[in-house]
Image (cartoon, helix red, strand yellow):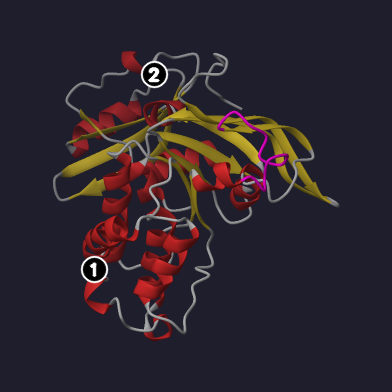
Amino acid sequence: MMNPSSEGERVSLRLSIRNVSRNFKTLRALRDVSLDVEAGQVHVLLGHNGAGKTTLIRIILGLIRPTSGSVSLFGEDPWRNRSRRGMRQRLGVLFEPDALYEDISAWENLEFFARIYRLELAKWEEETKQLMEQVGLYDRRHERVVKWSAGMKRKLAILRALQHQPEFVLLDEPTAGLDVQSRGRVRDAIQHFRRRQTTFLIASQDLSEVQRLATHVTLLREGRSLYSGTLAGFYRAARLRRFHGSVDDVRNLLRNLPPGVELVREESDLLGAAVVLRINREVDPETIRPVGLAETPVLMEDIYLELDR
């Protein structure tokens, strides 16, 4: 498991997880997971269904207790302080079920939760109007939610999690089931709040969430952390490089692969050919400079599959 170096508690640290495991009878849902989330980060928990993402979020929120390990949220143990209003006020949360009141309007849904959070309604109305316009919901704000599509409901649920301007937002599969345009609008809303220094932890199996939003990534597989750190480090960790050029130059490279370099995949297109190479740990990736070939970005999917294999 690859994790960033431990530097102790920092003032900007919103979340610190150390060696957390969680067992459900014979199932080990999490196994010795550690990660940090600092202020202003968009940290994506990446993994397929069953990887342990939702279980970890429930532990962070104090809804279930870890079998072992420790969690510090805003410097406190969320299990011991799970009923404290102050901690909940600083959080925004979205689980995969939308949990909306479908027999009332979208605006009434948001206003109901605004009153729970005791927001100043005049200011809330102005900011909510802007948010609903940003995600394309404002013109239909007075419709009952039961009439809405799954994608519209999802966007409304995300606004509900963000509307009290929490310091730290936890989103579980925020763009699942949304069309391309709706996903873009949701990501714009996340970026809008990030510019306000809101911190995000996003559980997702969508690689585009990493590519378009993440500053940091934790990759989970079967409850284990395979990587946790910066997005740049995530790209480096796979030790893959991709080169593009003429078919002849690519064939020449494949005939003369240096020791410690393996072929992952060969590709072809209208402009020539490309190869994805795996660089073993004994070899410095920067020493691989094939003649006549240009280096091009490795696909996020290749990185994910390489680290997850």
Asked if disc 1 and disc 2 are in contact, CB closer than 8 Å, the reply is: no
| Residue type at tag 1 | Gly
- Crowd rating for badge 2 (residues with CA inside 10 Å; few <14, some 14–19, many 20+): few
Tell me: residue 291, above or below residue 70: above
Q: Height in image: 276 above or below 222?
A: above
**Which secondary structure lies at badge 1?**
loop
Residue at x-position 54% and y-position 16%? 5
Q: Which image quadrant: the C terminus?
A: top right
The N terminus lies in quadrant: top right
Secondary-structure class at tag 2: loop
Magenta region: 74-84
Q: Is residue 253 left or right of residue 46?
A: left
Question: Which label lies toward us, 1 or 2?
Answer: 1
Q: CA distance from mark 1 to mark 2?
A: 53 Å
Please state which of residues 191 and 254 is positioned toward the viewer in this rendering: 191
Image quadrant where residue 21 sits: top right
Q: Amino acid at mark 2?
A: Pro
**Horizontal relation, residue 292 to residue 200: left or right:** left
Question: Dot 2 corresponds to which residue?
Answer: 258
